Amino acid sequence: MTPRRPPRSRRPGARTPVALAVPALLAVAFLLMPLVGILARTSWSELGTHLTSPGVTEALRLSLLVSFWALGLSLLLGVPLAWLLARVAFPGKALVRSLVLLPMVLPPTVGGVALLLGFGRRGVLGPWLEDTFGLTLPFHTSGAVVAATFVAMPFLVISLEGALAGLRPAYEETAASLGASPVRVFVTVTLPMIAPGLAAGAALTWARALGEFGATITFAGNLPGTTQTLPLQVYLLLQDSPEAATSVSLLLLALAMAVLVALRGRWAGT
């Protein structure tokens, strides 16, 4: 009996079915049109003036502060969580993974309401935080950090869990057999081996925190110099100065594209 040959992969120059090519091109056009709109409507002669105005520079400073703090919290909490999901079998693991994914599918304003009910002054944990540490999160910069961390940390956990799940444990087992403690194995062996996945997840987490809007405005408010980040500044500028709003949107677009170009498909595995 003649063995069956494996199916041939499509050659680069093979003919693409029109029934697939047309919808694909329409999808590309659909995704590209908003970007073209921003570029077409940007007032290039006033771009520098818009981006150096006091309100925008203050919002940019606050956005960078909030996003980097959110990234730090995500690394501190998300890396151990990703390791736990990838390496440890425990009851309720599916539920924990669902909780990780929840902020990605939850409407941002609903996430902000949930944060208020959990960490607000009348929430479940808010009164204890205020009485014990004097910490009030809503309408404070720390609240903006919490909101950004809530929506951005899942990107780090998902990226890192995938990298850990695909890692062969042989090197870790060898290090453990030589007497290294679990923490030392994780720091000296595991982390260097998953560094590309960690870097990709961190970049996506930072970019998502930088662009956070809904949960921030609902939980932390829109106070200039305190919680008014760049996305919130765009929201206000749309009402008073659409041209300036377009310029700031272009800045956020450029930052997001820079992150994606730097990753070069590492997060998607292409």
Image: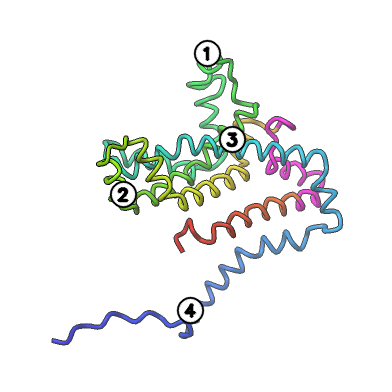
Say which amino acid is labelled 2.
Tyr
Say which amino acid is labelled 4.
Ala
Say which amino acid is labelled 1.
Thr
Residue linked to disc 4: 19
Gap in angstroms between the C-alphas marked 2 and 1: 45 Å
The picture places residue 144, in percent across and down from the top left corner, at 61, 33
Residue linked to disc 2: 171
Say which amino acid is labelled 3.
Trp
The picture places residue 157, in percent across and down from the top left corner, at 44, 44
Q: Residues within 10 Å of mark 3 (few under 14, many from 20)?
A: many
Gap in angstroms between the C-alphas marked 4 and 3: 47 Å
Residue linked to disc 1: 132
Please give the name of the residue rendered at 57% of the width and 20% of the height, measured from the top-left corner.
121
Instruction: Indicate whether residue 246 is drawn in magenta.
Output: yes
Outermost residue toward the front in this view: 178
Q: Say whether disc 4 or disc 3 marks the residue closer to the N-terminus.
A: 4
Residue linked to disc 3: 69
Q: Nearer the viewer, mark 1 or mark 4?
A: 1
The local secondary structure at tag 3 comes to helix
Residues rendered magenta in the picture: 223-247
Q: Say whether disc 2 or disc 1 marks the residue closer to the N-terminus.
A: 1
Q: Nearer the viewer, residue 1 or 71?
A: 71
